């Protein structure tokens, strides 16, 4: 697990440093996590995102690199996950009165499951599907809701993915 975590940290660091010239936005998102695992209560999540302009692939596209944290629990069970994701995003009209976007991507989900004070860690690969709106607040700042669905494996029988309802803030540069 430690080797896999180190690999993903290095890979994300390289993506951040080598692609800085093509950067399109920095974002922060937060909201509610509705776990796919039966029996867990709704939780919360937060995510930092770095959007890379990929207009050479599609005129209104970006690749979003994300690093986050989400959590859900119930009684003596707690699931905590650190997702490291890459998502291909298509925007409807980034310069219009609002921007509708959607996309899909892959990720590594570093999970920690605590049951009756026994802690266990695991890594699951998964897919994510995202859609949302951005409402410009200024030429470089936007705010908007986002819906994300994560399909990932199980950690000791507990599904790691679920549905996310977020509010995001993006700074374009």
Image (tube, helix red, strand yellow):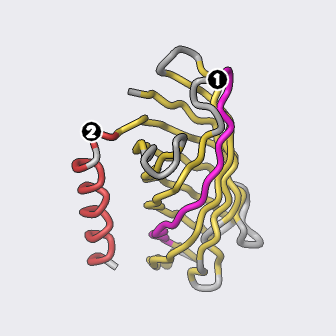
Please give the name of the residue rendered at 68% of the width and 48% of the height, measured from the top-left corner.
131
Residue nearer the viewer, 50 or 89: 89
Magenta stretch containing residue 98, yes or no? yes
Q: Quadrant of residue 127?
A: bottom right
Tag 2 secondary structure: helix
Q: Quadrant of residue 55?
A: top left
Q: Which residues are magenta?
A: 97-112
Furthest residue in direction top, as rendered? 138
Residue 58 coordinates in the image, percent (x, y):
52, 48
Residue nearer the viewer, 74 or 48: 48
Crowding near pointer 2: few (<14 within 10 Å), some, many (20+)?
Answer: few
Kindly report the distance in space between the C-alpha atoms of the residues bearing marks 1 and 2: 24 Å
Res. 96 mark: 1
Tag 1 secondary structure: loop
Above-or-below relation of 102 to 145: below
Q: Quadrant of the C terminus?
A: top left
Furthest residue in direction bottom, as rendered? 156
Crowding near pointer 1: few (<14 within 10 Å), some, many (20+)?
Answer: few
Q: Quadrant of residue 137?
A: top right
Residue 47 appears left or right of 1? right
Magenta stretch containing residue 118, yes or no? no
Residue 42 coordinates in the image, percent (x, y):
72, 55
Above-or-below relation of 167 to 36: above
To which residue does mark 2 refer? 21
Residue 26 coordinates in the image, percent (x, y):
42, 36
- Does the image show residue 49? no
Please give the name of the residue rendered at 50% of the width and 16% of the height, measured from the top-left corner.
139
């Amino acid at each position: 697990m430690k080797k896999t975590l180190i690999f993903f940290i290095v890979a994300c660091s390289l993506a951040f440093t080598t692609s800085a010239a093509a950067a399109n936005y920095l974002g922060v998102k937060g909201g509610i996590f509705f776990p796919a695992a039966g029996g867990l209560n709704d939780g919360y999540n937060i995510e930092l995102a770095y959007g890379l302009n990929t207009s050479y692939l599609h005129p209104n596209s970006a690749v979003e690199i994300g690093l986050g944290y989400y959590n859900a629990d119930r009684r003596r069970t707690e699931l905590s996950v650190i997702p490291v994701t890459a998502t291909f995003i298509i925007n409807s009209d980034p310069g219009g009165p609002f921007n509708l976007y959607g996309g899909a991507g892959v990720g590594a989900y570093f999970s920690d499951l605590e049951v009756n004070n026994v802690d266990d860690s695991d890594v699951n690969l998964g897919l994510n599907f995202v859609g949302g709106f951005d409402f410009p607040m200024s030429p470089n700042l936007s705010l908007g809701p986002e819906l994300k669905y994560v399909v990932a494996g199980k950690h000791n029988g507990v599904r790691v993915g679920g549905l996310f309802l977020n509010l995001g803030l993006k700074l374009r540069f």
